[in-house]
Image (cartoon, rainbow, N blue to C red):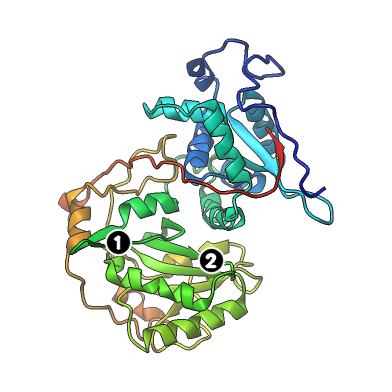
Amino acid sequence: MEGRLRSDPHPSAHRGRAGRGGRRAGEPDAALWFRLVDRDRRLLALLAEHKVLTTNQIAAIEFLSVRRAQDRLRHLRELGVVFAFRESYVRGGTSQTRYALGYLGARLIAAQRAEKPPSPKAYTESLERLALWPKLDHQLGVNDFFCALAAHRNPARLRETGRDGEVSGLTQWWSERRCTEFFWKYQGGGRETRLRPDGYGCWEDAGRTVRFFLEHDTGTESLAKVTGKLDDYAAFPTDAFGVLLFSVHSARREIALRAALRRALGGGDPGFVIATAARDGNTFGHADGPAGPVWGLWTPQSGDNAPRRYGLAELPQRGPSVEHSASNTDQPLNEAAFDRMDPEMSRRIDAPQPEPADLAGYADDDDDLDDVTLYDDADDDHVYRAPVAPARPDALRSRRTRWAA
């Protein structure tokens, strides 16, 4: 089955098909937008931002069951607003279905944002590059991390439990592209520092707010290359925006990474908080996933094995305090997001680096939790609301796949 392709003839092939609930012949894009419910619009916005999601990921963040997700996604495919594809395996079988923004979905998002829509030919080529992209598995892994967090505030489940409208859990989810556009600092002399995390998030639970940068490690890079990323984080005011999380594929890799961090930093403090976790059954096997007590703080004094594990909300609080914006379908899961153009953001980025906070003892003493909290609890005058500008889709590369639109 490897290499067999099954594809729709064209992203806009559904334009003239009435079908069961499909696109009506001659129906304008604006009319199609109003046939969608808020859940559909949120999904289109997430696909525009994060490129690709699996059936299980979509079900986790928006539906009560995988079956309900499959039924709705089938309808959205008939409308032409999402595109589906699968990868064939060498020994038979296929991957779980992956979903990307379909051509009509891309036109709707462009219209909503007052942007020029892509041409059909160019968008078809972008879908082909996405489906065959060498980094696709890595991107799916990053999205799996954030969807596991977003599942805690699944709107359907919140309504079922009488918590409709509750805003907690994952309140910010930025893609790598958005991070690269925001987290950069001009150093003078034509030099700049630009962070390229795999994602950036904000987790809120039980009155605590933890902002974080995510480095999703699959083991394909050398540890020297992984720890080499610390130079950019050290040159940027990372501690003013969040903690740095390393998510690695196994407990063995985590031990090796913690040892490599000690060697790379020479026993010194990096100036920001680092925590590590493995995605095997020893840690991410926890019922709460990456939100659970799976994170081991790294300090110059800590060993290669984390002395104890913390929940995501228990990690040191870092970053600006932002008044939540209204929930919307343009940028879902971004109520606590901020804007670089805000004067407070410019001040944080351009301010001199503070002295590193001493986290010694944090991993051994529950009573130290409040002592190391440096989260901004400023007066209301310093709390602000900021819009988030839309990100542009990344340039993509190639890989072999089965298609279904």
* Residue 25 placement: quadrant: top right
**Looking at the image, which is closer to me, 133 or 153?**
133
Q: Is residue 92 above or below residue 275?
A: above
Exactly how many numbered labels are in the figure? 2
Is residue 396 in view? Answer: yes
Mark 2 lies on residue: 292
Q: Give the class, few, some or many, for how many residues have Cα within 10 Å of label 1's Cα (few <14, many ≥20).
A: many
Gap in Å between the C-alphas at discs 2 and 1? 21 Å
Left or right for 365, reference 11: left
**Residue 196: % across, % down:** 40, 60
Q: Residue at x 49, y 39 (%)?
A: 48
Q: Is residue 274 above or below residue 171?
A: below
Is residue 377 in view? Answer: no
**Looking at the image, which is closer to me, 351 or 1?**
1
**Residue 58: % across, % down:** 60, 43
Dot 1 amino acid type: Gly
Q: Which of the image's four quarters has the C terminus? A: top right
Mark 1 lies on residue: 319
Q: Earlier in the sequence, mark 2 or mark 1?
A: 2
Left or right for 89, reference 313: right
Q: Residue furthest top?
A: 26
Dot 2 amino acid type: Gly
Left or right for 41, reference 282: left
Q: In terms of secondary structure, where does tag 1 sit? A: loop
Q: Residue at x 20, y 73 (%)?
A: 354
**Residue 241: % across, % down:** 31, 62
**Residue 63: % across, % down:** 61, 40
